[in-house]
Amino acid sequence: MIILIDTHSHLQLPEFDADRTDVILRMQSAGVKTITVGVDEATSRAALALAEEYPSCLWATVGTHPADGPLRPGSEASGLDSFNIDTLRELAVHPKAVGIGECGLDYYRLKDGAEQIKEKQKEVFRAHIAVAKEVGKPLMIHCRPKKDTDDAYEDLIGILSTTHCSLPTVIHFFVGSVSVAEQLLALGCYFTFGGVITFTRDYDEVIAVIPLSRILAETDAPYVTPVPYRGKRNEPAYVEEVVKKLAELKGVAFDEVARITVQNARAVWKID
């Protein structure tokens, strides 16, 4: 059986409460393993607990999402208000925590003049980088710019350049331009792509530029379900469709893309 690694899911979220065990069994039957990603203290602790329960196929990352978005409905950036670096340090040393995040910058929903929120995001992101350096674990970065701009990526590049973070850094759900991708490649970053690439051509050009040696596959389950499962809740077993699309776009055999993306995931996250 071909093994695949879904490097970004959220199996601890309420969307899976009714049938989480069945979802994990389907994932295992499909030969898929996953990293389930924390977005605040509660979901980070839940991710660690789930990874402890399924040690052969699940790992966790711990962190604070930079904005509300679909993961935390409510007022802008409220999740940052409860951020505590000592709590992050505590979670980061857990043996099932393979990385720090998701963390980063999200300007997508910010109104013009929201500089105070941007500065808070940067402050919390720098704290995540500091903890990652302390524990020697890679970063899972969420970065989302304002529509039709690269603003958040430009600030991200500035922070990564000035903090001199030599740890593996993964840009989750990359939506930036070719120019941004090239700058992040020069900084040694990896990139994840998910179900969105199966139903839009918007990512074809940037995927062509990024070498397979820097690409990871993800689902972001329960969100962004790939074709042919559109309209259903996403789950890690569907990462196969992402790998199929990457193989098509790269003109490389599915088995080879599976092998390389798994090899990349193991190298970055130190998992087996």
Image: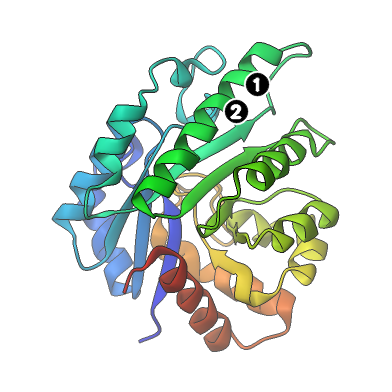
Give the position of the C terminus as an image quadrant. bottom left
Alpha-carbon distance for marks 2 and 1?
Answer: 6 Å
- Residue at x 52% of width, y 24% of height: 68
Name which residue type carries label 1.
Lys
Which one is in front, 239 or 168? 168
Name which residue type carries label 2.
Lys
Q: Residues within 10 Å of mark 1 (few under 14, many from 20)?
A: some
- Residue at x 73% of width, y 62% of height: 186
Reading the image, the residue beneath label 1 is 118
Which one is in front, 24 or 115? 115
**Image side of residue 148 versus residue 5, left or right:** right
Reading the image, the residue beneath label 2 is 122
| Residue 47 is at least partly visible in this image | yes
The spot of residue 62 in percent (x, y) is 35, 42
* Figure check: 232 above or below 1: above
Q: Residues within 10 Å of mark 2 (few under 14, many from 20)?
A: many
Q: Residue furthest left?
A: 53
SS at mark 2 in the image: helix
- Residue 147 is marked as none
The spot of residue 218 in percent (x, y) is 51, 59
The spot of residue 40 in percent (x, y) is 37, 30
